[in-house]
Image (spheres, rainbow, N blue to C red):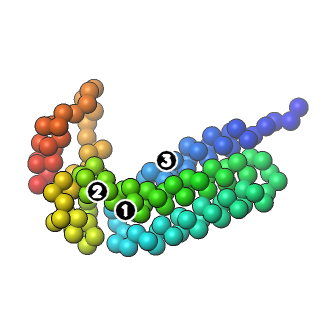
Amino acid sequence: MEINLVGFAAALATFLGIWWGHVSVRKIEREVVHLWKPTVIALVLGLGMWVASTLTSNMPLSAAAGILGVTLLWDALEISVRQPKRVKKGEAPANPNNPRHAKILAEYPAATTVDLLDRDPIGRQYTVDEIAAMKEGAK
């Protein structure tokens, strides 16, 4: 009997790709001044992983490379388009030491330096007033 590792490789690649992608997108968007550089890197790596997934005959490796490739392509979109919008709307924290974010903080009233993910759970959704109080308390 041969052991099929495709499912395990796919699950592991999916979990690690999403976890690493989420953390890195937040970190990169917060720290990097020119977002086109990490966006291009993610695009090139994502396309490279896709090509690698088609060239290998090892099925678990092919599955993992394909999943990581599409995850990197999605991360490129997140870095260049979606995460900056979250910062402008105040859904992600702005970094006042980053010149790009300093401009966002000056131009968009909803932008904040408060990380709304860094809070104690209360067992229910926070109300709009509670979120406003958290943002106000950080000023």
Disc number lying in front (1 or 3): 1
Name which residue lies at 50% across and 52% down: 20
Residue found at x 15% / y 48%: 135
- Image quarter hosting the N terminus: top right
Residue on which the image places disc 3: 19
Q: Name the residue under label 1.
A: 29
Mark 1 secondary-structure assignment: helix
Mark 1 is surrounded, within 10 Å at the Cα level, by few (under 14), some (14 to 19) or many (20 or more) other residues, namely many
Q: Earlier in the sequence, mark 2 or mark 1?
A: 1
Count of numbered labels shown in the rendering: 3
Q: How far apart are marks 2 and 1 (CA)?
A: 9 Å
Task: Say what amino acid the circle numbered 2 marks.
Answer: Val
Do callouts 2 and 1 mark residues in contact (Cβ within 8 Å)? yes
The three-letter amino acid code for the residue at tag 3 is: Trp
Compared across the picture, whether 131 is left or right of 115 comes to left
Residue 5, horizontal then vertical, whole percent: 75, 40
Q: In this view, does 12 lie to the left or right of 129?
A: right
Q: Which residue is drawn at 14% across and 51% down?
A: 138
On the image, the x and y values in percent for residue 88 come to 26, 57
How packed mark 2 is, by other alpha carbons closer than 10 Å (few <14, some 14-19, many 20 or more), is many
Tag 3, which secondary structure?
helix
Q: Residue 103 carries which label?
A: none
Label 3 crowd (10 A; few <14 / some 14-19 / many >=20): few
Which of the labelled discs sits on residue 87, or is there none? 2
Mark 2 and mark 3 in contact? Answer it, CB < 8 Å: no
